[in-house]
Image (tube, grey):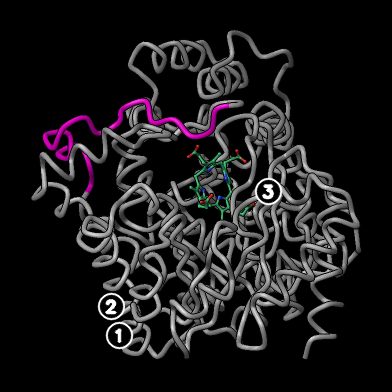
C-alpha cells in the first residue's frame, strides 16, 4: 500500500487495479466515501482536468463504496488474493512487492526503508522460498522492532491495524486544544507517519472537534517532520518523547543532512492530510498548519531529543557560529517551502513554534532566533503573493521569551502567542498595537476544580481586555488531564468573552 500511495503521490495517477487495491484498503481502514472522493480527486487533478476526473473516475470510487452499479459492498483484497490474482505488468503498481518485485528492486526498497543488509537478507530469504506473507511479516517485525509478531499476517488492513496498535496509533494519542500545542507521549514512532497520510484524515472525525466547542483545528503532525525530511531518523520512545538515534554531534555531521530538500516529495503526506482534513471539516472551523522554528528544530537535531539545558545545542552557538547559521538557514529554507505547501494544500493560518526561545538570552535570541523567524514571515508572504495564494494569518509562539515581546510584535507576524508565565496586560503593552495576542492559561490549571477553572478564565478574559485576542492555553496539555476540565475551559471562554464584548 505504501508503494501504491507513493506512486499516486508522485505520478498523480494509478491504473485500474492499483486504484481498486488501494481504494478498497482505504475504505477498510475507515475512509468515508466523501473522503475517498476528495482524496482521489485532489491527487488526480494535479495532472488532469477536474471535469475529466468527475466524469471518468468518480463513478468508480462511488462504485467501490456500493453506491453505483450493482451496489455491492466490495471487500478489500486479502494478501492471498493480491498474491494470486491480477499479476501486475509494465506500468502497474498493484500486487504484493514480496511476490511481484524482482530481487534488486526489493533490495533497494528494503535499504531505502532503513533495513540493515542483515535484516534485508532475512526478509529476502522468505521471498526466495516463496513465503511472501512470511517475508512481509518479517518486514513488519523488523520495522516495528518486535522479536516475533503475535499474529499471522493475512491482510493489508490487518497490517495497518497491528501497526497502529504497536505504535500506539492515532486512536490512543492524546489530543490537544485549539491553538494545538503538544500532544502527550504516545506509544511509539508517531512521527513515522508517512504511510499514515490518509489515516491523519481519519483523525478529523475523532479529533477534539467532535467533543469540544472549538473554533479552530490544527493539523495532526509534529514539528519534527522537518528534521526527518532533512534526512534524520526520529523515533518516538514510549514515555520519553522524540529520540534521534543519530543526533548532530559536530558540524561535520551536517554532511549527513540533506540541505536542499524536495519538500513536496518528503512532506507531501502532510499536504495530503491537510487537503483531506480541510474537506472533512467542511468549513466548520479553520485549519491551522504549523512548523517548528529553526532554532527549536536545530536544538532537537543536536540534542537528539528533549533536554532541560539544551546545552549541547547552545554550545554550537558559542563554538560553531558559522555552522549554526548555515544549519539555521537550511532549516529556514525548508520551513518556508513547507509552510507555503501547507497553504497551497488548504491551511488557513500558520503557527511557528519557537518552543526553545526561553533558553536563549536577548543577544542570542536576536541573532539565532528572531533573524530566522522574521525571514520566515517575510519570505513566506513574498512567496504566497507570487504564487497567488492567500496571505494567511501568521502566528508566532516563542515560549519563555519575555524579553522578546516588543521584537516579536514587529517581526512580521499577525499574532503573538504567549505562554502562561506572561501577565496578559503587560504582554499587551510590550507587543504594541496592531498585533493580536494568543494565550495563555496555564495548562496545569486544568488540574484544578471546575469552579477554579472558570475563575481563572474570568481573570484571563479581564487581563487581555477588549483588543484582539485568541483565547488559548499557554502551552500543550498532558495526557492525564481530565477532558471534562478542558470542556469547562472552552465553554467558559465562550460564555465569559461574550459577556465582556
Ligand atoms: C504527533 C505528535 C505530536 N506530538 C508528539 C507526536 C508524536 C506522537 C505522540 O507522542 O503523540 C510528541 C512530541 N513532539 C515533541 C515533543 C516534546 C519533546 C520534548 O522536548 O521533551 C513530544 C513529546 C516536539 C514538539 N512538537 C510540537 C512542539 C511545539 C509546541 C510545544 O512547545 O510543545 C514541540 C516542541 C508541536 C506539536 N506536536 C503535535 C502537534 C499537533 C497537535 C496535537 O495533536 O497535539 C503539535 C502542534 C503532535
- The residue that mark 3 highlights is 477
Task: Please tell me whether residue 254 belongs to the stretch shown in magenta.
Answer: yes
Mark 2 and mark 3: span between their CA atoms?
A: 32 Å
In-front residue for pair 233/244: 244
Give coordinates of residue 65: x percent, y percent. Answer: 83, 61
Image quarter of the C terminus = bottom right
Magenta part of the protein: which range? 240-258
In-front residue for pair 500/276: 500
Closest to the camera, between mark 2 and mark 3, is 3
Q: Are marks 1 and 3 in contact (CB under 8 Å)?
A: no
- Does the beta carbon of the residue at mark 2 sit less than 8 Å from ligand 1? no
- Left or right: 71 as drawn, with respect to 240: right
- Left or right: 16 as drawn, with respect to 496: left
- The residue that mark 2 highlights is 379
Give coordinates of residue 117: x percent, y percent. Answer: 33, 16
In the image, residue 457 above or below residue 133: below
- Which residue occupies 26% across, 33% down? 312
In the image, residue 93 above or below residue 363: above
- Which residue occupies 58% across, 8% down? 147
For mark 1, give the secondary structure.
helix
- Does the beta carbon of the residue at mark 3 sit less than 8 Å from ligand 1? no
Q: Is residue 102 visible?
A: no
Q: Using the rendered view, name the quadrant where residue 420 is placed.
A: bottom right
Q: Are marks 1 and 2 in contact (CB under 8 Å)?
A: yes
- The residue that mark 1 highlights is 382
In the image, residue 265 above or below residue 155: below
Image quarter of the N terminus = top right
Instruction: Return the disc, 1 or 3, that comes first in the chain's sequence.
Output: 1
Closest to the camera, between mark 1 and mark 3, is 3
Amino acid at each position: 500500500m505504501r508503494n501504491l500511495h507513493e506512486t499516486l503521490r508522485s505520478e498523480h495517477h494509478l491504473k485500474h487495479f492499483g486504484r481498486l487495491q488501494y481504494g478498497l484498503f482505504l475504505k477498510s481502514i475507515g475512509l468515508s466515501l466523501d473522503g475517498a472522493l476528495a482524496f482521489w480527486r485532489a491527487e488526480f487533478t494535479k495532472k488532469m482536468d477536474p471535469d475529466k476526473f468527475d466524469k471518468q473516475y468518480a463513478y468508480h470510487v462511488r462504485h467501490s463504496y456500493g453506491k453505483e452499479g450493482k451496489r455491492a459492498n466490495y471487500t478489500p483484497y486479502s494478501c492471498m488474493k493480491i498474491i494470486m490474482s491480477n499479476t501486475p505488468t509494465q506500468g502497474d503498481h498493484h500486487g504484493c512487492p514480496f511476490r511481484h518485485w524482482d530481487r534488486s528492486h526489493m533490495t533497494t526498497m528494503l535499504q531505502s526503508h532503513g533495513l540493515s543488509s542483515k535484516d534485508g537478507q532475512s526478509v529476502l530469504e522468505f521471498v526466495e522460498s516463496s513465503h511472501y506473507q512470511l517475508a512481509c511479516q518479517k518486514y513488519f517485525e523488523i520495522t516495528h522492532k518486535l522479536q516475533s509478531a503475535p499474529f499471522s499476517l493475512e491482510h493489508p488492513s490487518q497490517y495497518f491495524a497491528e501497526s497502529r496498535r504497536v505504535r500506539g496509533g492515532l486512536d490512543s494519542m492524546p489530543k490537544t486544544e485549539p491553538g494545538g500545542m503538544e500532544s502527550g507521549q504516545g506509544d511509539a514512532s508517531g512521527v513515522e507517519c508517512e504511510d499514515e497520510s490518509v489515516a491523519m484524515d481519519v483523525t478529523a472525525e475523532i479529533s477534539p472537534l467532535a467533543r469540544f466547542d472549538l473554533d479552530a483545528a490544527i493539523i495532526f503532525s509534529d514539528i519534527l517532520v522537518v528534521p526527518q525530511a532533512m534526512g534524520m531518523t526520529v523515533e518516538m520512545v514510549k514515555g520519553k518523547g522524540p529520540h534521534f538515534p543519530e543526533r548532530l554531534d559536530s558540524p561535520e555531521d551536517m554532511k549527513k543532512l540533506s540541505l536542499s530538500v524536495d519538500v513536496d516529495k518528503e512532506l507531501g503526506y502532510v499536504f495530503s492530510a491537510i487537503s483531506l482534513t480541510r474537506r472533512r471539516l467542511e468549513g466548520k472551523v479553520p485549519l491551522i498548519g504549523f512548523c517548528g522554528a529553526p532554532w527549536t528544530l536545530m536544538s532537537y537535531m543536536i540534542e537528539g531529543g528533549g533536554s532541560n539545558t539544551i546545552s549541547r545545542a547552545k554550545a554550537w552557538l558559542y563554538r560553531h557560529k558559522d555552522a549554526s547559521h548555515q544549519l539555521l538557514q537550511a532549516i529556514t529554507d525548508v520551513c518556508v517551502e513547507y509552510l507555503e505547501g501547507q497553504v497551497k494544500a488548504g491551511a488557513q493560518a500558520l503557527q511557528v513554534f519557537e518552543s526553545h526561545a526561553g533558553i536563549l538570552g536577548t543577544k542570542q535570541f536576536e541573532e539565532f532566533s528572531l533573524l530566522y523567524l522574521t525571514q520566515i514571515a517575510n519570505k513566506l508572504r513574498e512567496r504566497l503573493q507570487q504564487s497567488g495564494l492567500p496571505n494567511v494569518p501568521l502566528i508566532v509562539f516563542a515560549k519563555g521569551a519575555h524579553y522578546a515581546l516588543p521584537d516579536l510584535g514587529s517581526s512580521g507576524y499577525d499574532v503573538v502567542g504567549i505562554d502562561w508565565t506572561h501577565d496578559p496586560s503587560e504582554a499587551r503593552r510590550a507587543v504594541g498595537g496592531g498585533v493580536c495576542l494568543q494565550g495563555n492559561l496555564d495548562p496545569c490549571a486544568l488540574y484544578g476544580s471546575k469552579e477554579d477553572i472558570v475563575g481563572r478564565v474570568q481573570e484571563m478574559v479581564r487581563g487581555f481586555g477588549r483588543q484582539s485576542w485568541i483565547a488559548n492555553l499557554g502551552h500543550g496539555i498532558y495526557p492525564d488531564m481530565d477532558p471534562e476540565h478542558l470542556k469547562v475551559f472552552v465553554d467558559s471562554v465562550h460564555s465569559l468573552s461574550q459577556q465582556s464584548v
